[in-house]
């Protein structure tokens, strides 16, 4: 897991809560934690409160990977 520094947090990071990301992907928030543990997904932690967040770019990457047909 990556820990963000205060200066790294900007409105352009588009950080989502696990609940919001899970709703977008149609999975349970615990699934996202398992994927992070398996290395399929990167979760960042806020410097204050140590709360987990997922960047929108990670969600987009997962959606794109799901839509790409496997050869």
Image (cartoon, rainbow, N blue to C red):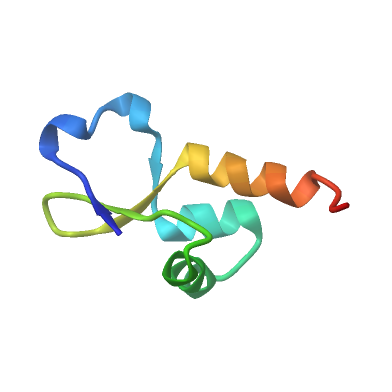
Residue 33, position in %: x, y? 44, 70
Which residue corresponds to the image point at 35% horizontal and 32% vertical from the top-left? 13
Q: Judge left or right: residue 45 versus residue 62.
A: left
Q: Judge left or right: residue 50 versus residue 22.
A: left
Q: Judge left or right: residue 24 versus residue 34.
A: right
Q: Is residue 3 above or below residue 13?
A: below
Which quadrant is home to the N terminus? bottom left
Q: Judge left or right: residue 31 versus residue 33.
A: right
Q: Is residue 56 above or below residue 42?
A: above
Quarter where residue 37 is shown: bottom left
Residue 44, position in %: x, y? 31, 52
Which residue corresponds to the image point at 35% horizontal and 25% vertical from the top-left? 12
Which residue corresponds to the image point at 79% horizontal and 46% vertical from the top-left? 67
Which residue corresponds to the image point at 50% horizontal and 37% vertical from the top-left? 57
Number of marks in picture = 0
Is 40 or 49 nearer to us in this picture? 40
Q: Is residue 10 above or below residue 1?
A: above
């Amino acid at each position: 897991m990556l820990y963000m520094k205060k200066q790294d947090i900007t409105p352009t990071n588009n950080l989502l809560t696990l609940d919001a990301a899970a709703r977008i992907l149609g999975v349970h928030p615990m699934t996202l934690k398992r994927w992070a543990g398996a290395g399929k997904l990167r979760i960042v932690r806020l410097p204050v409160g140590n709360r987990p967040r997922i960047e929108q770019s990670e969600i987009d990457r997962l959606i794109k990977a799901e839509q790409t047909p496997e050869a």
